[in-house]
C-alpha cells in the first residue's frame, strides 16, 4: 500500500498477515497503544474503518497485482515476478 510511513508499513504487513496488536507490538518493539495509533493512521489512509476491511483490501490488492503480473507475462512472453512493493 502506498503513502504509509516506514513504521506504518511494518505494522500494515504484520496486521494483514493476521497478527494481533499484542503480537505486532512485540515484533516491532512498541506498545499496543502505539500499534493502535499506527493502525488509526493506516485506516484513515486506506479509507477503511476496521481491521477486517484492511485485510480484505490487502487481499484484493495482492490478487489484482498477481493477475496483472500474469497478464503482463502472457503478453510479453516473459516471466515478471511480483516483489510485493
Image (cartoon, rainbow, N blue to C red):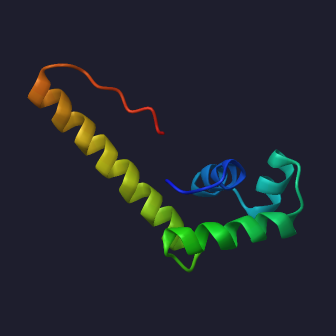
54 over 64 or under it: above or below: below
- Residue lying furthest top: 78
Place of residue 42 in the rendered image (x, y in percent of width and height, measured from the top left): 61, 66
Depth order, front residue of 4/84: 4
Residue at x 88% of width, y 55% of height? 30
Image-based side of 18 in relation to 67, left or right: right
Residue at (61, 49) in percent of width and height: 13
Q: Is residue 76 above or below residue 19?
A: above
- Give the x, y percent position of residue 17: 59, 51
Q: Outermost residue, left direction?
A: 75
Q: 41 or 67: which is nearer to us?
A: 41
Q: How many circles with numbers are drawn on the protein? A: 0
Does residue 22 sit above or below 83 in this rendering?
Answer: below
Residue appearing at x 51%, y 68% in the figure: 46
Residue in the image at 66% along x and 70% along y: 41
Location of residue 32 in the rendering, given as x and y in whole percent from the top left corner: 85, 65
Would you say 1 lies left or right of 80 here? right
> Quarter of the image holding residue 76?
top left
Amino acid at each position: 500500500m502506498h503513502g504509509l510511513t516506514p513504521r506504518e508499513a511494518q505494522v500494515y504487513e504484520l496486521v494483514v498477515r493476521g497478527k494481533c496488536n499484542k503480537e505486532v507490538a512485540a515484533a516491532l518493539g512498541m506498545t499496543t497503544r502505539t500499534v493502535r495509533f499506527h493502525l488509526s493512521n493506516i485506516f484513515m489512509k486506506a479509507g477503511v474503518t476496521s481491521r477486517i476491511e484492511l485485510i480484505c483490501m490487502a487481499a484484493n490488492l495482492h490478487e489484482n497485482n498477481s493477475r496483472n503480473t500474469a497478464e503482463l507475462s502472457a503478453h510479453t512472453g516473459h516471466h515478471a515476478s511480483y516483489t510485493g512493493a
